[in-house]
Image (cartoon, rainbow, N blue to C red):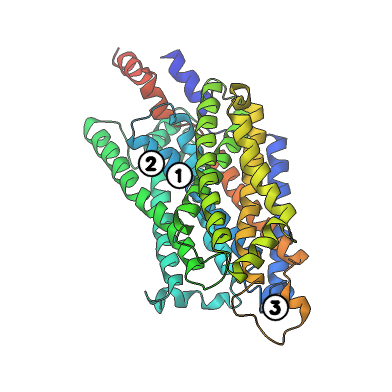
Amino acid sequence: MNTAYEKMIHDLAPKKFSWKGNAWVAFLVLIILAGIYSYVQQLKHGLVITGMRDYALWGIYISNFVFFVAVSLVGSLITAILRLSDVHWSTPLTRIAEIIAVAAIIMAGIAIIIDMGRPDRVLNLFIHGRLQSPIIWDVIVISTYLVLSILFLYFPLLPDFTIISKYSDTNSKLTKWYRALSLNWSGNEKQTKIYSRSIKVISVLIIPVAFAIHTVTAWLFETTYRPGWDSTNFGPYFVAGAFVAGSGAVVMVMYVLRKVYQLEDYITDSHFDKMGKILVMLCMVYLYFNINEYLMPIYKSTEEEEVHLRSLFTGEYAWLFWTAILGGLVAPVGVLLFPKGRKPLPLFLVSLAVVMGAWWKRYLIVIPTLSHPFLPIEGVPEAWRHYSPTWMEWAITAATLATALLIITLLVRFLPIVPIYETAEERGLLENQSENESL
């Protein structure tokens, strides 16, 4: 037997949760239960339990939806783009990125349903959807992206399932599931050729769909005639922001998993350094689009745009706006330009700031604009002109975030965090293993 090969399988095979893992799951479940209670109240009483009214007809539910869509793009960045570029250093990170992408896009779809006053009518989007409606564009790209993301996660797992079932308890139910999910993978030349070609095809397909989902999401805003959304820059602006949010999420998850499962031999400091360089580049690109997004309205200075921008720069949203820009973009760039800032712990803290800034940035995209329409609504109470989420809204939103983390946690429990087959292939362990088995 190849000792190095066996050690790698032992290190990377799924492991049962410790008491800390079970406590983490219980914590997430409690948050989800609080959200379910609040959502039941929303179903019972309607959207009146939220802070949304005639002015702010969208709230943190849609902000959350845009955030999940943004994070889901990471599956295309880390896996598809780097795979097609023949970049091998990212192999230990691909599974993490794919898991995050699947969890995020599932919750993006659920966030839309939560925002609906009549979720029982969601089926009408599929039965009676019309291409003239921008909403159906989102339904199509989200559904397509979800299917491709699941395939992108599943296909590279085929050889891993066979390896795990071979080196684990053959009588356990979990092993039987792994064996069934492997689709009789044996690693012969024909299977390997189909396997490699299939992953490349999915990689090619998922990139335009991923760009489309973020562009279409931007179009949903642009087709609404309101200050702050009347921009031809919104498509690339959303895509650039999505790359930033997704990369930050990957760094956070890879740091936690490396620490919890002692994966220092597979997720090294070099991976953090490279991810730090990618993140600083993406932050600088996103800063460029932010400058474009706000500079032209300032230059044109229409009355409606002026009111909107004043609320962001010096008004009621100024503290949040400058915190998101300076703390979530400018400061991370300053830190990540230095090698010490790209060490695991500093990079984790920077990524945490980036992800939090990304969520609040989506809040700032949605809420201030709705508060300053081109055509003001007449004769409404003053309280309706200002949006403030209720505790039930926060509970439901927190539950969606907790559900995304729970999906990631459960997938990490039952799937190898780092691809076993690809790692062994890159380290030359498969050839040695084959030679030992032939002897």
- Position of residue 409 measured from the top left corner of the image (x, y, whole percent): 60, 43
Q: Nearer the viewer, residue 435 or 372?
A: 372
Q: Residues within 10 Å of mark 1 (few under 14, many from 20)?
A: many
Residue at image location 68% in from the left, 53% down from the top:
321
Q: Nearer the viewer, mark 2 or mark 3?
A: 2
Labelled pair 1, 2 in contact (Cβ < 8 Å): yes
- Position of residue 115 measured from the top left corner of the image (x, y, whole percent): 60, 69
**Mark 1 sits on what residue?**
75
Give the amino acid at mark 1.
Gly
**Mark 2 sits on what residue?**
80
Residue at image location 53% in from the left, 40% down from the top:
284
**Mark 3 sits on what residue?**
44
Q: Secondary structure under badge 1? A: helix
- Give me the disc on residue 4: none
Give the amino acid at mark 3.
Lys
* Vertical relation: 156 (above or below) 266: below
Q: Nearer the viewer, residue 415 or 296?
A: 296
Residue at image location 41% in from the left, 67% down from the top:
137
Gap between marks 2 and 3 measured at Cα: 43 Å
